[in-house]
Image (cartoon, grey):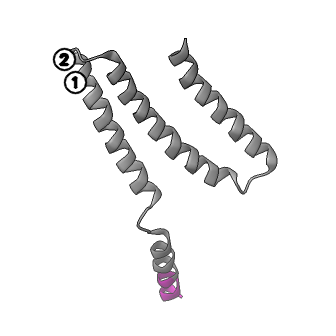
């Protein structure tokens, strides 16, 4: 009985580990975004054009939104229609929250 539990546990853990695990994607996204924000911080401190700094920060934010949107869709796709509508509304508001301040 104890051995059957061990084999079930090891087989389930091996199926969960994959090359692109959620934890790995999250970690490397944070690393990439940190590099982009650090570069924009250094450029801002040196006095480089604000448009370059803003572009780097916008790109970093876009990367995070894309990753989070994909992961959120993986959660929502098996849910009822109301969840999908809520997902789309939230995504549109986030996009508007990024674009509108850039335009104004």
Quarter of the figure that contains the C terminus: top right
**Relative vertical location of residue 58 with respect to residue 32 in this rendering, above or below:** above
Q: Which mark is residue 96?
A: none
Indicate left or right for 56 with 15 as reference.
left
Residue 102 position, x and y percent, is: 51, 18
* Residue at image mark 2: 46
Report the magenta stretch's main SS: helix
Q: What element does badge 1 sit on?
A: helix
Q: Position of residue 28 (x, y in %)?
A: 35, 49
Q: Which mark is residue 42?
A: 1
Say if mark 1 contacts mark 2, CB within 8 Å.
Answer: yes
Query: Residue 43: x percent and y percent?
Result: 24, 22
Residue pictured at 52% horizontal, 81% vertical: 8
For residue 82, what is the image quadrant? top right
Taking the magenta stretch, the answer to whether it contains residue 5 is yes
> Could you tell whether 28 is left or right of 87 in the image?
left
Q: Secondary structure at mark 2?
A: helix
The image shows residue 24, relative to residue 59, as above or below, that is below
Q: Which residues are magenta?
A: 1-7
């Amino acid at each position: 009985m104890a051995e059957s539990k061990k084999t079930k546990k090891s087989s389930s853990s091996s199926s969960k580990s994959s090359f692109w695990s959620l934890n790995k994607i999250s970690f490397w996204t944070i690393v990439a975004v940190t590099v982009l924000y650090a570069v924009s911080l250094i450029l801002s401190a040196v006095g480089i054009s604000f448009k370059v700094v803003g572009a780097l920060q916008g790109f970093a934010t876009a990367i995070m939104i894309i990753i989070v949107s994909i992961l959120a869709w993986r959660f929502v796709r098996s849910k009822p229609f109301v969840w999908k509508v809520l997902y789309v509304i939230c995504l549109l508001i986030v996009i508007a929250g990024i674009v509108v301040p850039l335009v104004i």
